[in-house]
């Protein structure tokens, strides 16, 4: 079997363009690995498991350096003079995260002549130009499943925050106010409401399972139907037509990957057809929706509340309209980087690096680009 794989690889190399000759598996020798993470600053020392930061660098520095590899960690990722740009010409592996994304453009890929492997510490690799990566023969992989529980729990929290109109009450307490009417006039029970998830992959399924005890009417739209047993367990109904599902929903949750097909999928036209006062949760990707259209709809009341932790771009600029629109419960990109999630995606990243050094395959579900082919969810 190994000889067969070697033969196939040799044929591919002969038939491919020069760009398709980078290999996922590491030949012998020292490698240069660059990690781009957010800074922990004064919080870095408050928790020894706070590993997803510049200061702790996933906790893999000693392990890498003991094997003779070079490990550079930075948060400086933007502009021609940033720290990341300085290392593009000779790095072999780039590790990044969705929470502080290093945007890997086609231009950067061309500069990175030695680059072989792009790893996402977490889930979601849309900050990488996946088409350019595939054309360059790079491997892109992420730690699939590492933070699905974290994100699903966060989505449930955001649904409840919006439905119960929680934030105005919290703000009253901070401001020394007490006005029950100012909260109660738009606070509802979740029971009996129609909740639809746009996407029912790992996170979407977990959300539906967690919503089941609330006695909601659950709907889902996806390119694939769920297993019949899981449909029965959750009571969720498959909606093949997205535009038929959305107007039925009191609450809409986005759980789709960002692709060219899904970019801007919630636009002004679709928003205009939703129930007036619909509540929307988006922990998937900010660019799935039309930024200004969402802000305008929150201002008009067409959208009754919008909550999420994903923006475009990230970090969000100070003048981003979602910071100032009414009825929002936005946060920085935090849902998938709980301490528990960090430990999982740090371990998963280390495992893939170890496999890379040893010339072994990754878990199949981790591949986003392999041998020039994109994973189905990104096509």
Image (spheres, rainbow, N blue to C red):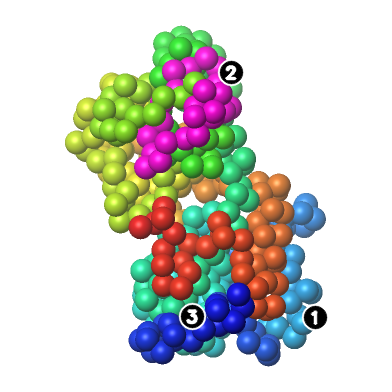
- State yes or no: discs 3 and 2 in contact (Cβ < 8 Å): no
The answer for how far apart the CA atoms under marks 3 and 2 are is 51 Å
The N terminus lies in quadrant: bottom right
Name above or below for residue 14 compared with residue 80: below
Q: What secondary structure is marked by label 3? A: helix
Residue drawn at the location 59% of the way across and 18% of the way down = 213
In the image, 336 versus 13, the foreground residue is 13
Asked whether the viewer can see residue 283, the reply is no
Q: Residue at x 80, y 80 (%)?
A: 66
Does dot 2 land on a helix, a strand or a loop? helix
Tell which tag, 1 or 3, sits nearer the viewer: 3
Q: Earlier in the sequence, mark 1 or mark 3?
A: 3
At a point 41% along the width and 55% down the height, the residue shown is 376
Q: Is residue 217 magenta?
A: yes
The residues tagged by marks 1 and 3 sit, at their Cα atoms, a distance apart of 34 Å
On the image, the x and y values in percent for residue 159 come to 49, 27
Q: Is residue 153 visible?
A: yes
The magenta region covers: 208-233
Residue 8: assigned label: 3
Picture residue at 79% right of the left edge, 74% below the top: 62
**Residue 252 x, y percent position in the rendering:** 39, 30
């Amino acid at each position: 079997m190994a000889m067969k794989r070697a033969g196939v690889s040799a044929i591919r190399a002969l038939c491919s363009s020069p760009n398709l000759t980078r290999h996922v598996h590491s030949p012998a020798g020292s490698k240069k690995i660059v990690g781009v993470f957010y800074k922990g600053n004064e919080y870095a020392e408050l928790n020894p498991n706070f590993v997803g930061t510049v200061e702790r660098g996933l906790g893999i520095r000693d392990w890498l350096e003991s094997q003779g590899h070079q490990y550079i960690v930075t948060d400086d990722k933007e502009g021609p003079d940033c720290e990341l740009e300085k290392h593009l010409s000779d790095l072999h592996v780039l590790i990044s995260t969705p929470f502080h994304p290093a945007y890997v453009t086609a231009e950067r890929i061309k500069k990175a002549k030695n680059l072989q492997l792009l790893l996402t510490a977490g889930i979601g690799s849309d900050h990488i130009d996946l088409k350019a990566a595939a054309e360059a023969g790079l491997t892109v992989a992420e730690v699939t499943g590492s933070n699905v529980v974290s994100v699903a729990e966060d989505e449930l929290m955001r649904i409840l925050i919006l439905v119960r109109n929680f934030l105005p009450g919290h703000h009253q307490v901070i401001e020394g106010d007490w006005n029950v009417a100012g909260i109660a006039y738009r606070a509802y029970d979740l029971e009996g409401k129609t909740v639809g998830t746009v996407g029912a992959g790992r996170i979407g399924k977990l959300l539906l399972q967690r919503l089941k005890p609330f006695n909601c009417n659950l709907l889902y739209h996806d390119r694939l139907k769920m297993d019949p047993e899981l449909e029965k367990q959750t009571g969720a109904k498959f909606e093949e037509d997205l535009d038929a599902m959305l107007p039925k929903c009191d609450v809409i949750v986005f759980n789709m990957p960002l692709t060219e097909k899904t970019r801007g999928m919630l636009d002004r036209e679709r928003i205009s057809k939703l129930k007036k006062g619909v509540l929307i949760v988006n922990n998937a990707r900010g660019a799935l929706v039309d930024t200004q259209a969402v802000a305008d709809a929150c201002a008009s009341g067409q959208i009754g509340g919008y909550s999420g932790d994903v923006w475009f771009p990230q970090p969000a600029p100070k003048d981003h309209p979602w910071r100032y629109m009414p009825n929002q419960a936005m946060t920085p990109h935090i849902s998938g980087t709980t301490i528990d999630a960090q430990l999982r995606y740090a371990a998963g990243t280390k495992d893939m690096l170890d496999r890379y050094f040893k010339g072994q395959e990754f878990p199949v579900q981790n591949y986003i680009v392999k041998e020039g082919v994109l994973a189905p969810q990104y096509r």
